Amino acid sequence: MAPTTHTVTNQVPPLVGYDVFAADLALTEAVNRHLPSELSAEVRTELGELGRAAGSAQAQAWGAQANGNPPVLRSHDRYGNRVDEVEFHPSWHRLLGHAVGAGLTDAWGRPAGHVRRTAGFLVWTQAEAGQGCPLSMTHAAVPALRTDPALAAEWEPLLTSTAYEEGLRPPGRKAGVLFGMGMTEKQGGTDVQANTTRAEPLSEPGAYLLTGHKWFCSAPMSDAFLVLAQAPGGLTCFLLPRVLPDGGRNPFAIQRLKDKLGNRSNASAEVEFDGTWARRVGEEGRGVHTIMGMVAATRLDCVTGSAALMRQAVAQAVHHCAHRSVFGGPLIGKPLMRNVLADLALESEAATVLAMRLAAAYDADTESERAFLRIAVPAAKYWVTKRCTPMVAEALECLGGNGYVEESGMPRLLREAPLNSIWEGSGNVQALDVLRALRREPSALNAFLQEIGRARGADHRLDRAIKDVLTELADLEGIEARARRLAGRMAAVLQGSLLVRWAPPEVADAYCASRLGGDGGAVFGTLPHSLDLASVVERARPVER
């Protein structure tokens, strides 16, 4: 029946059918900046293809379907046999298959591999963030496995493969595999040294049987896992396959799937080991050291994943305001809304620029860049993931009541936003890791100071903020209680220095005025009115230039 009470007008069209990569100037500029010139055309082509796929109606439908149909645990088959399998909606497999096919588990063996993968991760996870977990775990397992050349030779080609094959089979019969991780236990949480899972050595060199539990097991449908357990020599890292070479199932009892706030398309589980076969990775008693390469790589993905959520939230907010008319004109043109949008855009661009700088440091792989990463990764992980939730909430508000409705997609972004701050060590862990790097590795602080020092003299607010950080570092009294403040300030100064060097003047000016001066960006939409906010908002608008 035709409507008779009113005609539908002034409704915003969906943001669909666009190139997520090309429409993101902060990202495209970062890719150009950090890529060798001979790779530029190739990588821009692959990212453009991925960007158009991510912005398509099909990928958006896949994301909504995967989120709306969470995974289901199938503990037993129809005959009562234990199978411990996780069933996913077909759209989940389509998303994950596309990501693997695009090389999002392969950074370690390609030229500029981390820059191209980080950019691709930022683009593709905007379609649905839940797939980020298995992509990240699989990619990040490589540095841990490289501590054992034989294991790396066996598994790395499968981890970095662009072939996605769902279902559990012996790894030797698959063209590509996924990895998960299990460190946390009920009684210990972050304190993995309190783990009680036992590892009993077998006569076969490097082989053990594990008995115990994991309170959080990431991506339980994976082909293999890196886990921690107490061996005779202390806490040790192990590779635990789901299916043994003879085709038999390794004991791996999934007790239940977690009912999570967000990240609902992805499975997280509680699992039990009872005589479960595993291979040692690294030396006995060196488990934390061995697995830290994996943890550091996944922490960068936390930064990148938050940057992706921020970018999608900003894109939706700016798109809405560009098409919505209020009080006689476009909402985007109203001074106060323009202030809010510009402030959100600053947060998004700063996160993107920082994530890409960290990726470039991984690719450079020099001693100075490795030292820089040891302090910059936990500081960035602390700050960017903390900023994500209030930023996405403010972007949702830009849509008004429409943003609070599930159909807008904004509630899904908001529910996802806190995850990266918790995953791979919550805020306190990151802040304490910054202190640990400061105390134990003078080269890390030197590398950080050299990095921010490259922008000294370009902005007086940045110079003052750098001086304040140095003052904080000089006062060690009660520094642990101040660790959050220090980590956040170091990250904000690092972001400011990168924007001063590389962003347009209006972006750098607004960031330094608000984050390094003023009220520190505590409330979005409070930028000084004298700034060129219109240019900042236009730069963030999700249209191809």
Image (cartoon, helix red, strand yellow):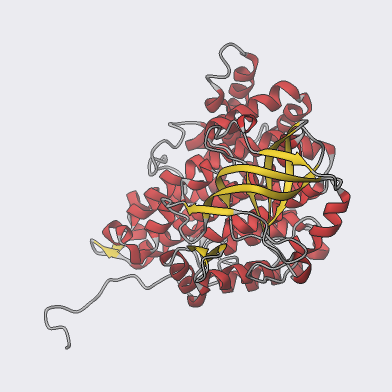
Q: Residue at x 71, y 21 (%)?
A: 439
The quadrant of the rendering that contains the N terminus is: bottom left
Q: Nearer the viewer, residue 158 or 333?
A: 158
Q: Nearer the viewer, residue 251 or 349?
A: 251
Q: Position of residue 220 (x, y in %)?
A: 58, 56
Residue 25 visible from this viewpoint: no
Q: Position of residue 279 (x, y in %)?
A: 78, 48
User: Looking at the rendering, which quadrant does residue 230 occupy?
Assistant: top right
Q: How many marks?
A: 0
What residue occupies the far bottom of the structure in this picture?
Answer: 1
Q: Nearer the viewer, residue 466 or 433?
A: 433
Q: Position of residue 332 (x, y in %)?
A: 37, 59
Residue 269 visible from this viewpoint: yes
What residue occupies the far left of the structure in this picture?
Answer: 5
Q: Residue at x 53, y 26 (%)?
A: 485
Q: Position of residue 475 (x, y in %)?
A: 61, 13
What residue occupies the far top of the structure in this picture?
Answer: 477
195 lies left or right of 445: left
Q: Against 179, is 385 above or below?
A: above
The quadrant of the rendering that contains the C terminus is: bottom right
Q: Against 312, is 423 above or below?
A: above
Q: Residue at x 67, y 67 (%)?
A: 100
User: Looking at the rendering, which quadrant does residue 477 occupy?
Assistant: top right
Q: Residue at x 59, y 62 (%)?
A: 123
Q: Against 80, is 418 above or below?
A: above
